Image (spheres, rainbow, N blue to C red):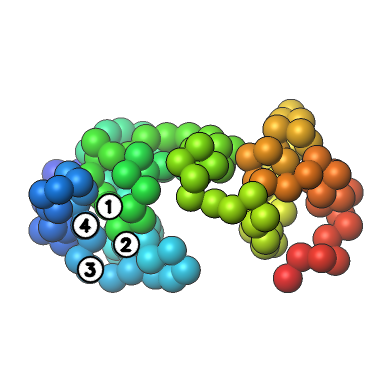
């Protein structure tokens, strides 16, 4: 991937938003959170992840690209940072972007199991996801019949 070409492409497919400093993606987006998507060498990827790589540097497969601006369409590298799913959930709670009575979905359960295997406690995962540590324990034990 030629990063200079990718940077120019990202800049041409985004529009600066003067009030927030976001670079709003103007090309293709995908549900459910409407992140921008871009095709690189025939592979469709999330635009903010490609922007991080092109403008900042290496993107480890084990980390997510987080938005400090909380705008999924933003590709401004100054608004992007690396973190874990747990970091992202904590940030969401700290900023009041999630209800403590949230409904977990299968991808959440997969992430919770992974984070638990990495050594995070049921208590801290419960706090991050807004559920009880008992719920986290049930997810890790495979009792997930309550998941949609």
Given residues 135 and 108, the one toward you in this image is 135
The residue that disc 3 covers is 27
Cβ–Cβ under 8 Å for marks 4 and 2: no
Mark 1 or mark 3: whose residue is earlier in sequence: 3
Label 1 vs 4, first from the N-terminus: 4
Q: What element carries label 1?
A: loop
Helix, strand or loop at disc 4?
strand
Does the residue at mark 1 contact the one at mark 2 (Cβ under 8 Å)? no
* Mark 2 surroundings within 10 Å by alpha-carbon count, few (fewer than 14), some (14 through 19), many (20 or more): many
Judge depth for marks 1 and 3 and give the one in front.
1
Dot 4 surroundings within 10 Å: few (below 14), some, or many (20 or more)?
some
In this rendered view, identify the residue nearer to me: 56 or 42. 56
Label 1, label 2: how far apart the Cα atoms are: 8 Å
First reached walking from the N terminus: tag 1 or tag 2 = 2
The percent coordinates of residue 130 (x first, y second) are: 67, 46
Which residue position holds label 4? 24
Q: Classify residue 22 as left or right of residue 143.
A: left
Q: Number of marks in the image?
A: 4
Mark 3–mark 4 Cα distance, whole angstroms, equals: 9 Å
Q: Mark 1 points at which residue?
A: 74
The image shows residue 70 at horizontal and vertical percentages of: 37, 48
Q: Residue at x 13, y 58 (%)?
A: 15
Tag 1: Cα neighbours inside 10 Å, few (<14), some, or many (≥20)?
Answer: many
| Relative to 80, residue 120 above or below | above
Q: Badge 3, how many Cα within 10 Å: few under 14, some, many 20+? A: some
Whether residue 100 sits left or right of residue 72 in the image: it is right
The x and y percentages for residue 60 are 46, 36
Comes first in the chain, label 4 or label 2 = 4
Q: Nearer the viewer, mark 3 or mark 4?
A: 4
| Quarter the C terminus occupies | bottom right
């Amino acid at each position: 991937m030629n990063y200079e070409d990718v940077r120019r492409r990202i800049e041409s497919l985004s529009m600066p938003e003067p009030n927030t400093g976001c670079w709003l993606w103007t090309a293709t987006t995908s549900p459910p959170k409407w992140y921008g998507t871009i095709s690189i060498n025939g592979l469709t990827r999330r635009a903010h992840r490609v922007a991080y790589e092109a403008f900042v540097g290496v993107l480890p497969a084990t980390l997510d690209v987080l938005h400090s601006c909380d705008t999924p369409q933003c590709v401004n590298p100054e608004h992007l940072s690396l973190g874990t799913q747990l970091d992202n959930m904590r940030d969401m709670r700290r900023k009041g972007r999630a209800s403590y009575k949230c409904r977990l979905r299968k991808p959440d359960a997969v992430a919770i199991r992974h984070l638990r295997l990495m050594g995070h406690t049921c208590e801290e995962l419960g706090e991050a996801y807004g559920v009880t540590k008992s719920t986290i324990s049930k997810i890790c034990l495979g009792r997930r019949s309550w998941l949609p």
